[in-house]
Image (cartoon, helix red, strand yellow):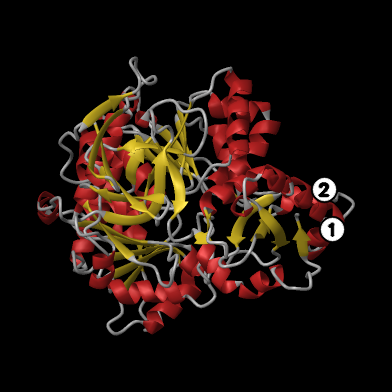
């Protein structure tokens, strides 16, 4: 075993130096771990709330604001921030915890949450974990964007909740009624924050405001003191890349060890409480575990952003960022893509955004180089300096952090080094290195799915995450790992040559920026590579300004200027390519957006390659038709 430390001086202001332990038990296996020993960690998430309620009682923990309208023709304006301090939050958590225990909820009767992020959602989530009730935050998309509610119904049937919390009875009524009608008797109770509804059995939903007035008894503290490392804190459902979602058991050990690792790698968090403005959904591990718990662990403030990276909603994010200057900013590449035009065009917003910023963090998908460069450009324009720009790697099953970038990097794609306490196994798999993970942050398994759990681990107990990785610089391994695609996504052309989908996808999007929102790589057992392209509609429309704003998207993708722009940019890849596996020869612009019901897209905007290929077989066939389809763009 050897320990590698690339940097003789501190790796960056407030970062822990990158220390890497390397073991090679065989020629086809490498074991990586951090040179930083994982220090003792908290017993449960609730200890952080108890601590800060005592030592920083008036510090803002959560804040949110909704848009308010005067009822006329004027656009809605941001309302004042509603704020909850640590002291207030703890008081509410004890009252809500008592109410949960009163209704008989426990480790076997979890709490299901149908809600976007909100203060009520956050308080109920913390209350449930405080008294040992597993929290199951269900993706809002399964209720609000689904047509058949199949995933919602499946999840509720599987977990058998003791209670369902709904933030808005009117908004979720249709989905809730469909789900309750499909559940076996007795159906769970319903708790609502606004717009009370009557469930199909005729019972009136209870009101969150009434619950919040509950006087806590001694058993709340008793339940809290019984929590241990193996207590199930949450059940988070994966996005369902194939088939139905899987319920990932999240224990207190997973959540607390992960935050301890983060605090050791980013010790600058102890110098001032973080201020975070965040939209990322709490039904996913990025927003619900990484960001919320990082805030709570370090006594910070989480400003809930009711905007999203979507047209018509990103404007809410912009308004929030004009008001609140974050010290840390987390997002997915799609979020940065939509935010950047506002930062580039508005000097005041740009100055405000970067004024207190210590760190920019992206995850969940690869960040294209053009977005990286534009972010740096905005930072330099605003202040002359660039905050740390970093990433990490993991999954719902790893709570989520498995590796972390805690040192300077000058390009995207690097996913860092193993977090303290984590061992990453690099196992040879075809012409790649498959990454597997073991550590206190790894799930014990999937909820009520023993066979899936058994398949998820190898014979040594390492979790099979399904990703590949490689060293950024094999001669200097402490510079970190690079994400090298999904093992299951890669395929061979009929020549037997491997196509590395993740790497090619990033190159395609960068080459055609900003015209392509995302793309799917085709060509399994075929002679050449093709593309199914989800267009960036705003960028494509900018090429044909003479089109009426109301012109349908069909006219946009049929416009010769759009097609030629795509063709000219992507055709360059062929001349620069080193073989048929490195460039596309044909492409098709897709009119129909990616479908959540068909598993094509998560509500964070990540495109599932396999699901798109399965769902759009007709489009793939048209790409490769003997007689060229008129919708196909020939690239070379």
* Marks 1/2: CA–CA distance: 9 Å
Residue 236 appears left or right of 385: left
Disc 2 secondary structure class: loop
Residue 7 image-quadrant placement: top left
Q: Is residue 54 above or below residue 630?
A: above
- Give the label on residue 543, or none: 2
- Residue appearing at x 18%, y 64% in the figure: 107
- Residue of label 1: 559
Crowding at dot 1, Cα within 10 Å, few <14 / some 14-19 / many 20+, comes out as some
- Residue appearing at x 39%, y 26% in the figure: 407
Q: Is residue 311 visible?
A: no
Question: Quarter of the image containing the C terminus?
Answer: bottom right
Q: In the orientation shown, which residue stands out farthest toward the top?
A: 9
Viewer-proximal residue, 299 or 628? 628
Q: Is residue 225 above or below residue 165?
A: above
Image marks 1 and 2: residues in contact by CB distance under 8 Å: yes
- Residue appearing at x 21%, y 35% in the figure: 51
Return the x and y of residue 606 as percentages of the image width and height: 52, 55
Question: Quarter of the image containing the N terminus?
Answer: top left
Q: In the orientation shown, which residue stands out farthest toward the right?
A: 546
Q: Is residue 460 above or below residue 392?
A: below
């Amino acid at each position: 075993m050897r320990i590698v430390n690339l940097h003789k001086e501190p790796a960056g202001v407030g970062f822990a130096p990158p220390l890497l332990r390397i073991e090679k038990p065989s020629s086809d296996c490498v074991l990586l771990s951090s040179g930083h020993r994982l220090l003792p960690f908290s017993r449960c998430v609730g200890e952080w709330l108890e601590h800060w309620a005592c030592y920083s009682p008036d510090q803002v923990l959560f804040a949110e604001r909704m848009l308010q309208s005067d009822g006329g023709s004027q656009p809605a304006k941001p309302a004042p921030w509603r704020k909850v301090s640590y002291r207030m939050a703890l008081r509410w958590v004890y009252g809500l915890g008592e109410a949960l225990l009163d209704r008989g909820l426990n480790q076997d009767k979890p709490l299901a949450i149908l809600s976007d992020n909100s203060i009520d959602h956050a308080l109920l989530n913390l209350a449930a974990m405080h008294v040992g009730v597993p929290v199951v935050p269900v993706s809002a998309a399964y209720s609000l964007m689904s047509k058949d509610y199949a995933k919602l119904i499946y999840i509720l049937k599987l977990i058998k909740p003791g209670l369902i919390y709904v933030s808005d009875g009117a908004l979720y009524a249709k989905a809730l009624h469909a789900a309750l009608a499909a559940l076996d008797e007795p159906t769970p109770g319903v708790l609502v924050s606004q717009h009370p509804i009557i469930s199909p059995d005729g019972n009136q939903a209870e009101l969150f405001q009434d619950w919040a007035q509950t006087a806590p008894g001694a058993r709340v503290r008793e339940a809290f003191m019984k929590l241990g490392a193996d207590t199930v804190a949450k059940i988070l459902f994966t996005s369902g890349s194939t088939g139905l979602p899987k319920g990932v058991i999240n224990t207190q050990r997973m959540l607390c060890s992960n935050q301890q690792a983060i605090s050791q790698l980013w010790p600058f968090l102890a110098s001032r409480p973080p201020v975070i403005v965040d939209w990322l959904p709490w039904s996913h591990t990025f927003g619900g575990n990484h960001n919320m718990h990082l805030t709570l662990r370090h006594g910070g403030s989480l400003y809930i952003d009711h905007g999203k990276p979507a047209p018509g909603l990103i404007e809410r994010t912009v308004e929030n960022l004009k008001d609140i200057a974050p010290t840390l900013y987390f997002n997915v590449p799609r979020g940065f893509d939509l935010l950047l035009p506002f930062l580039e065009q508005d000097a005041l917003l740009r100055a405000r955004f970067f004024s207190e910023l210590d760190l920019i963090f992206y995850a969940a998908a690869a960040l294209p180089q053009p977005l990286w460069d534009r972010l740096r450009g905005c930072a330099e324009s605003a202040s002359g300096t660039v905050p740390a720009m970093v990433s990490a790697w993991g999954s719902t099953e790893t709570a989520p952090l498995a590796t972390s970038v805690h040192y300077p990097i000058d390009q995207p794609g690097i996913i860092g080094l193993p977090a303290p306490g984590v061992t990453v196994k690099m196992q040879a798999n075809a012409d790649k290195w498959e990454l597997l993970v073991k550590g206190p942050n790894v799930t014990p398994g999937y909820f009520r799915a023993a066979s899936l759990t058994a398949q998820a681990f190898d014979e040594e107990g390492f979790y099979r995450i399904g990703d590949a990785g490689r060293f950024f610089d094999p001669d200097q391994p402490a510079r970190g790992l690079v994400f090298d695609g999904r093992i299951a996504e890669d395929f061979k052309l009929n020549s037997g040559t491997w196509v590395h989908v993740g790497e090619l996808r990033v190159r395609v999007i960068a080459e055609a920026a900003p015209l392509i929102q995302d793309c799917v790589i085709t060509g399994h057992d075929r002679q050449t590579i093709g593309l199914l392209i989800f267009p960036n509609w705003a960028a494509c429309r900018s090429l044909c300004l003479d089109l009426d704003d109301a012109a349908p998207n069909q006219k946009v993708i049929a416009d010769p200027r759009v097609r030629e722009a795509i063709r000219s940019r992507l055709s360059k890849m062929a001349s620069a390519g080193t073989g048929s596996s490195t460039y596309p020869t044909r492409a098709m612009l897709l009119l129909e957006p990616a479908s959540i019901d068909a598993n094509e897209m998560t509500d964070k905007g990540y495109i599932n390659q396999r699901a798109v290929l399965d769902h759009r077989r007709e489009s793939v066939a048209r790409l490769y038709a003997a007689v060229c389809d008129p919708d196909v763009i020939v690239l070379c």
